[in-house]
Image (spheres, rainbow, N blue to C red):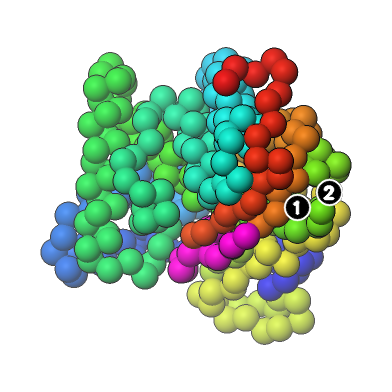
Amino acid sequence: MLGDDAIGVLAGSGFGVTPHVDFIAALADRLKIDLSATLTVMRHLPLWIDGPQHAELRRKVAAFLAEDRAAKLARATTRIRHVVVRTLGTDGSEHVDLFRMVSEVVDLFMEELTGLPRPEGDPSCMPSIFSSNLGVAARRRLEAMLKQQFVQANDLFPNEPIELHALRVGQFVMGRDALIGTLGLSLHHHLASLGEQKVNARRLPSIPTHTGLPAIGRISSFAQTVAGCPVSAGALIECRLDSLAGRPAADRRHFFGVGPHLCLGRPLSLALWECVADVLAELEIQLTTTEFALAQNDVFDIPLVFTARKSPPSRLLSGYPV
């Protein structure tokens, strides 16, 4: 489904979430591999849950995200501005790795939001908890990463119950890939639209122009007609969020979903985007993309390579430490 039809499905009451939790549980049982940390995280994310349990999980997530929100955003903003200015404003090199910058910005944001340090390893090689196509080795690597984050959560917050640890780990892994993809894609298209203009010639729009999550699946709860097409009970419907790219900001807000599963992190995600926009609006430099390629990922559109040439190579900004 595209555009308004996709929005209608996401907002409609005749559709359920994909049974991804059941799929992973069955996979673990069939392959005889330990995916306990993966399943613990997934069962504490309202994304794959319907009914009364979904409403209860959303209340818990909303409370978690609201706790000390202003202070977390303030700390994240300070750190993010430093990373962007260090990479684009004060670094003397002509060539810049924008994927690394975007990844670091998102990781800093998630660290402040969840209280957990980023997982170790190459950010471009971290397996996604959302994927249905991971091999056994990648699933074991993901499981080990999640278990390490649970250990860190217990060390940093020893008096919290396991469900709060799961919320912290879950918010990190749920938001990271989508944010890196959304910021990376939107920044890439913005730079292309600028041509030879400097990055402060036109401010980033208030809503990202592209989304790192191209589609969301829904299951038809009963036989029905959707956008003029007959759909059987249990059929999977793919709602293409990327079809909203280039549409007005009011439509692009639906990148974060709509209806009962609207992303609770939308205000925080937009605050992160606004922070990046503020810094870029102060930079007297031109950025020209030199290489851009997406990673092979069955869920997200995430840059694997995103580099640019900066002109002039170095531009010191008043008010920023070097």
Q: Is residue 164 above or below residue 223?
A: above
Q: Where is residue 168 in the image (x, y as percent from the top left)?
A: 40, 32
Task: Give the residue number, with chain letter if any, for mark 2.
Answer: 197
- The furthest residue to the left: 32
Q: Distance between the residues labelled 1 and 2?
A: 11 Å
Name the one closer to the observer, 153 or 29: 153
Q: Residue at x 13, y 64 (%)?
A: 32
Q: In this view, does 120 lie to the left or right of 288?
A: left
Query: Three-letter amino acid code at disc 2?
Result: Gln
Q: Residue at x 86, y 54 (%)?
A: 248
> Regarding mark 2 in the picture, which secondary structure is present there?
loop
Q: Position of residue 36 (x, y in %)?
A: 22, 49
Q: Is residue 256 visible in this depiction of the protein?
A: no
- Within-10-Å neighbours for mark 1: few <14, some 14–19, many 20+: some
Q: Where is residue 69 in the image (x, y as percent from the top left)?
A: 58, 21
Q: Is residue 72 above or below residue 55?
A: above
Q: Where is residue 312 in the image (x, y as percent from the top left)?
A: 71, 41
Q: In this view, does 133 lie to the left or right of 61?
A: left
Q: Which mark is residue 190?
A: 1
Q: Is residue 58 above or below residue 121?
A: above
Query: Three-letter amino acid code at disc 1?
Result: His
- Within-10-Å neighbours for mark 2: few <14, some 14–19, many 20+: some
Q: Residue at x 23, y 31 (%)?
A: 151
For the C terminus, the image quarter is top right
> Regarding mark 1 in the picture, which secondary structure is present there?
helix
Q: Magenta span covers which residues?
A: 290-303
Name the one closer to the observer, 35 or 261: 35
For the N terminus, the image quarter is bottom right
